[in-house]
């Protein structure tokens, strides 16, 4: 988890939710989140991605 992409870009507040995508399609879902769903929700923090390399 420590080497997960975008982990260091997450807020340090313990009361803040973090979006995490895990699995073989994690990068595709993370890209879709950043381009569409995250913008609609007003979230500009990139999600944490746990793909095959990190798992």
Image (tube, helix red, strand yellow):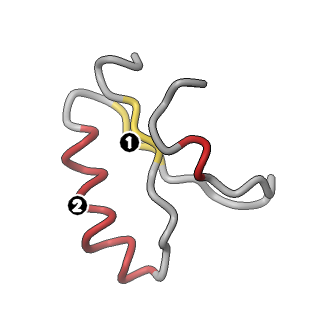
Residue furthest right in the image: 14
Nearest the camera: 33 or 46? 46
**Circle 1 Cα neighbour tier, 10 Å, few/some/many (<14 / 14–19 / ≥20):** some
* Label drawn at residue 21: 1
Q: Considering the numbered disc 2 on the image, is that residue within a helix, a strand or a loop?
A: helix
For the point 29% across and 29% down, which residue is it? Answer: 23
Quick check: 5 above or below 38? above
Q: Where is residue 35 in the image (x, y as percent from the top left)?
A: 26, 70
Pointer 2 residue: 32
The mark tally for this picture is 2
Left or right of 31, for residue 6:
right
Left or right of 46, for residue 18:
right
Quick check: 2 above or below 11? above
Q: Considering the numbered disc 1 on the image, is that residue within a helix, a strand or a loop?
A: strand
Q: Quadrant of the C terminus?
A: top left
For the point 21% across and 28% down, which residue is it? Answer: 24
For the point 48% across and 72% down, which residue is it? Answer: 44
Left or right of 51, for residue 2:
right
* Label drawn at residue 7: none
Q: Position of residue 12 (x, y in %)?
A: 77, 53
Q: Where is residue 52 in the image (x, y as percent from the top left)?
A: 29, 19
Left or right of 13, for residue 20:
left
Looking at marks 1 and 2 on the same chain, the residue that comes earlier in the sequence is marked by 1
**Circle 2 Cα neighbour tier, 10 Å, few/some/many (<14 / 14–19 / ≥20):** few
Q: In which quarter of the image is the N terminus?
A: top right
Quick check: 3 above or below 16? above
For the point 45% across and 37% down, which residue is it? Answer: 5
């Amino acid at each position: 988890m420590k080497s997960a992409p975008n982990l260091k870009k997450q807020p340090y507040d313990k009361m803040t939710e973090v979006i995490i995508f895990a699995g073989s399609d994690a990068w595709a879902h993370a890209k879709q989140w950043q381009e569409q769903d995250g913008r609609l929700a007003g979230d500009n923090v990139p999600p944490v991605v746990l793909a095959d390399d990190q798992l």
